[in-house]
Amino acid sequence: MGALSYFKEFFRIEWFKKFIAAKTEPLQVPAYFRNFPELTGNECTHCLECKMICPAPGAIDVFQHEDGQWRPQIIRGHCFRCGYCVEICPEEVLTSGGILAKRHEQNLAFTHEYKVLMNSMLCMGCGNCCTACPVNREIEPNMGSGGTSVSTNVLMRVEKGKNTVLHNDLCKGCKICEDTCPNGAVHVIRHVEAIQTGEY
């Protein structure tokens, strides 16, 4: 009897009309919602801050287009909409939700630094990280293939069979050293801090 009553109710004309005409309330996007970052139209200076701060591998890249302008591109399959790229960009090239408005309202600026951490137990002193580092190449173009260097101005060099970081303040966060290490002994970390630049 239960099933029969159910089918009788289901096939009533009044119920069927209500079912067909049912509508849901339109979706209201909350003010704090962070969507995928979009371009604002401001000029990108190719500083790569957005790419370096992004915690999702492959979520953002910066390309030079036919008009000669650099523009970041968001890969939606990798981006999880944290908004870090929007917050860190000094030129406000990207926007997402109310991030930029909030930044202006609170007079926020973001400072950051990168540090190269070495696991001496895993490092075999091959020097791949030292020779691949673009900072090292700029300071000492003729660095030895084993990562040895006579200069103490380089970011890192091989000393006594192990890679040694000399000047962490020179690190730009590109992670090339991390990517080229065959043993996973190098890890680049970033420290980001929001500061207020005026009254709030």
Image (tube, helix red, strand yellow):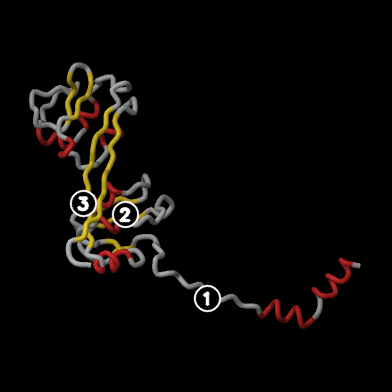
In space, the residues marked 2 and 1 are separated at their CA atoms by 29 Å
Instruction: Please give the label number shown on residue 84.
Output: 2
As drawn, is 198 to the left or to the right of 3? left
The type of residue carrying mark 1 is: Pro
Q: State the image coordinates of residue 172 (x, y, percent, origin top left).
A: 20, 42
- Please determine whether, in this image, residue 10 is positioned above or below residue 43: below
Task: Say the numbered circle drawn on residue 8.
Answer: none
Q: Residues within 10 Å of mark 2 (few under 14, many from 20)?
A: some
Q: Residue furthest top?
A: 160
Would you place residue 76 above or below residue 162 in this image? below
Q: CA distance from mark 3 to mark 1?
A: 40 Å
Secondary structure state at the residue bearing disc 2:
helix
Residue 198, by quadrant, is bottom left
> Spatial distance from mark 2 to mark 3, Cα to Cα?
12 Å
Q: Earlier in the sequence, mark 2 or mark 1?
A: 1
Spot occupied by residue 137 in the image (x, y as percentages of width and height) = 14, 33
> Which of the 4 image quadrants contains residue 96?
bottom left
The structure residue drawn at horizontal position 79% and vertical position 82%, both measured from the top left corner, is 13
Q: Are marks 3 and 1 in contact (CB under 8 Å)?
A: no
- Residue that badge 1 annotates: 26
Q: Please identify the residue farthest to the right as the structure is shown.
A: 1
The quadrant in which the N terminus is found is: bottom right
Amino acid type indicated by mark 2: Tyr
Q: Earlier in the sequence, mark 3 or mark 1?
A: 1
Q: Compared to 101, does 128 lie above or below?
A: above
Residue drawn 29% across the image and 59% down it: 86
* Residue 111: image tag: 3
Q: Residue at x 82, y 75 (%)?
A: 9
Instruction: Quadrant for the C terminus, please.
Output: bottom left
Say whether marks 2 and 1 touch (CB < 8 Å): no
